[in-house]
């Protein structure tokens, strides 16, 4: 069975199998250096640009702003959930997140 992923409502949601699952209205906690110099960075997402799967991890390309320093930038490959046995399990935005490196850039 395949999983249908897409962005909805001008990037406000990530849809999984035609069900809104992840919203930009949350503040995501990112590890030091992945978005700005804040430790950690509390980033309010403004829009999802794209969504993809890397293995079992659902990753998003998004735009956001750090609530501490004001840095506004894009975020590539933000893990927003995982797929296990054809079911989607979203990550908690408050848990410290990392960025998923593309296959060609992994050590």
Image (cartoon, rainbow, N blue to C red):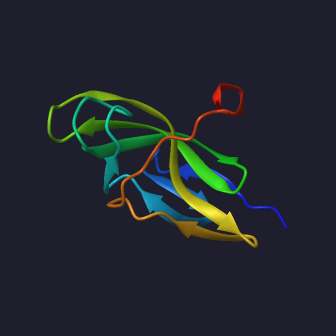
Is residue 17 in view? no
Q: Quadrant of the N terminus?
A: bottom right
Q: Where does the image place residue 40, in percent across and percent down from the top left?
A: 26, 44
Is 96 placed left or right of 54 in the picture? left
Could you tell whether 53 is left or right of 10 in the image? right
Extreme residue in the left direction: 68
- Quick check: 22 above or below 104? below
Residue 22 visible at all: yes
Looking at the picture, how far across and down is residue 52, in whole percent? 65, 45
Expressed as whole percent of the image width and height from the top left, the position of residue 92 reads 40, 65
- Residue located at (47% from left, 63% from top): 91
Residue 16's x, y, as percent?
Answer: 62, 62
Quadrant containing the C terminus is top right
Between 22 and 69, the residue placed more toward the observer is 69
Quarter of image, res 86: bottom right
In front of the other: 7 or 100: 100
């Amino acid at each position: 069975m395949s999983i249908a992923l897409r962005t909805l409502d001008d990037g406000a949601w990530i849809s999984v199998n035609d069900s809104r699952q992840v919203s930009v209205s949350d503040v995501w906690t990112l590890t030091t250096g992945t978005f700005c110099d804040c430790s950690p960075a509390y980033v309010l997402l403004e829009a999802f640009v794209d969504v993809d799967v890397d293995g079992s991890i659902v990753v998003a390309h998004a735009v956001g702003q750090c609530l501490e320093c004001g840095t506004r930038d894009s975020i590539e490959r933000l893990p927003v959930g995982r797929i296990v046995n054809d079911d989607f399990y979203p990550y908690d935005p408050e848990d410290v997140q990392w960025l998923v490196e593309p296959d060609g850039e992994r050590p």
